[in-house]
Each structure stands twice: as structure tokens, then as C-alpha cells.
Image: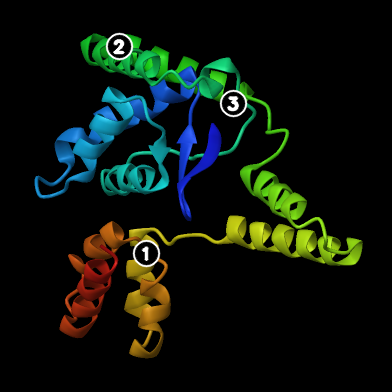
């Protein structure tokens, strides 16, 4: 959902529409009381997203989803869509005011009203059309235009390679903590690293809590530590 952009080298975020803002804020509000006190990403989310009108970073979305998975809740699934004037608009003050208003209204709403608003927002999000051009396609086109001296054959080869890389990235899946724990219980130590690398840092700690094998538990904690 939303428009993807690169806010610094190889780090990405999303500019959401109003309906998507409601989904994001509601998803965060559901788990905010379960975020460990030693984590700082939630304060950064409230500061950057709610108070300053910035986009939602991929890292923050992953952090929200990690807590939601741990609580057995559905995750936020980001997808690129075509966007309208609101998501394109650069007025961050307007967006921060809008997001704080949504946050306050959802907190004050009854469970029924809150659920109705979330369902309405999700229905609106599903109606958003696919993008005229994805971010990867836009970046590839811009790079090709900047190197206009390339031959037609070279341009075609590069475009096909980018499309293949994009497809491979979409097909890559991160293991859930439950599936990873099951696989680790069945696997020998020879392939532990292959399984652990499919986990986020947060999920690796969640799996470690369920493991009795000291060597495997240390491997999970070390991976989570190195990923910070």
C-alpha cells in the first residue's frame, strides 16, 4: 500500500493515503502497551510519523509487525499502489495534524466504532489501483536515462536483470517464529544458520525463549545482537 520512496541510500519508506494512515495507526495502537521498555523505535515512530508527518519506514513497519505476530495479531502488509493528491502532498504539518486526530479519535472510540473505522479503511485500501510505475521501475528508468550512451542491447539486458531481481525479492519470505522453531527442532546444527538468517532480530529472540538447547539459543541471541 502507498508510495514507496528511498529516504537515504538503500533505506526505504512509504507515503500512505488517509485510509492507510488509519490502518497503520490502529495497528500500532493495538500493540503499543506490549512494546518492551528498552526499545526506542516506538518513540521514533510517534515522533516522525505522528508528530512530524514523515513517511513510515520499512524498519518501523517490521518492528510493529514483529510485536503483532508475537501477540497473534494480523500484520500490516505494505504494497505499492497508485496514490492521490494527499499522499503526494508535501505539507508535513497537515499530515501530522491529520494523524494525531486519527490517533485521538481511535483511542476515544468504542470498540464497535473503532472496528467499523478499521474495516472501512481496509476496504478503501483494497480499492486503490496498482501503481502506474513501481519505485524499482522508476529508479531503473532514471538510471537508464542518465546513461544514455548505453546500447539498446545493454539497456534491454539491464532491464531484464532488474525485473528478475525484483521478482526474486518479492518471492523471498521471512520465516515466522513458529515455523522457524519447528524447523530448528527438526534440523541438525549444520543448517541452523540457514534457518536463523530468515528471522528478524526481534523474532530470533522470540524463538530463543522457546529453545532449551544452549548452543542453539546462543546462536539465536548472537544473531539478534548482530542485527541491531
Q: CA distance from mark 3 to mark 2?
A: 23 Å
Q: Residue at x 60, y 19 (%)?
A: 84
Mark 1 vs mark 2: which is more N-terminal?
Answer: 2
Q: Which mark is residue 60?
A: none
Q: Which mark is residue 126?
A: 3
- Of tags 1 and 2, the one toward the viewer is 2
Residue ID for mark 2: 101
Mark 3 in CB contact with mark 1 (< 8 angstroms): no
Q: CA distance from mark 3 to mark 1?
A: 28 Å
Rendered location of residue 1, percent (x, y): 54, 33
Q: Nearer the viewer, residue 115 or 93?
A: 93
Left or right: where 223 falls relative to 161: left
Residue ID for mark 1: 199
Rendered location of residue 78, percent (x, y): 50, 39
Q: Nearer the viewer, residue 158 or 22?
A: 158
Asked whether residue 30 is in view, the answer is no
Amino acid at each position: 500500500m502507498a508510495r514507496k520512496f528511498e529516504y537515504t541510500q538503500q533505506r526505504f519508506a512509504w507515503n500512505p493515503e488517509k485510509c492507510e494512515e488509519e490502518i497503520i495507526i490502529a495497528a500500532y495502537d493495538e500493540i503499543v502497551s506490549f512494546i518492551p521498555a528498552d526499545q526506542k523505535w516506538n518513540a521514533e515512530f510517534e515522533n516522525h510519523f505522528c508528530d512530524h508527518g514523515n513517511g513510515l519506514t520499512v524498519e518501523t513497519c517490521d518492528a510493529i509487525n514483529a510485536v503483532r505476530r508475537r501477540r497473534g495479531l494480523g500484520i500490516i502488509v505494505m504494497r505499492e499502489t497508485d496514490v492521490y493528491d494527499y499522499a503526494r502532498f508535501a505539507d508535513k504539518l497537515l499530515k501530522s495534524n491529520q494523524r494525531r486526530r486519527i490517533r485521538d479519535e481511535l483511542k476515544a472510540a468504542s470498540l464497535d466504532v473503532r472496528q467499523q473505522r478499521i474495516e472501512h479503511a481496509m476496504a478503501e485500501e483494497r480499492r486503490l489501483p496498482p501503481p502506474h510505475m513501481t519505485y524499482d521501475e522508476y529508479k531503473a528508468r532514471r538510471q537508464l536515462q542518465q546513461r544514455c550512451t548505453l546500447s539498446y542491447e545493454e539497456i534491454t539486458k539491464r532491464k531484464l536483470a532488474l525485473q528478475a531481481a525484483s521478482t526474486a525479492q518479492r518471492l523471498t519470505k521471512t520465516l515466522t517464529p513458529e515455523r522457524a522453531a519447528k524447523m530448528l527442532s527438526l534440523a541438525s546444527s549444520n543448517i541452523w544458520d540457514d534457518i536463523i538468517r530468515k528471522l528478524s532480530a526481534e523474532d530470533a529472540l522470540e524463538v530463543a525463549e522457546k529453545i532449551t538447547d544452549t548452543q542453539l539459543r546462543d546462536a539465536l541471541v548472537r544473531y539478534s545482537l548482530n542485527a541491531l
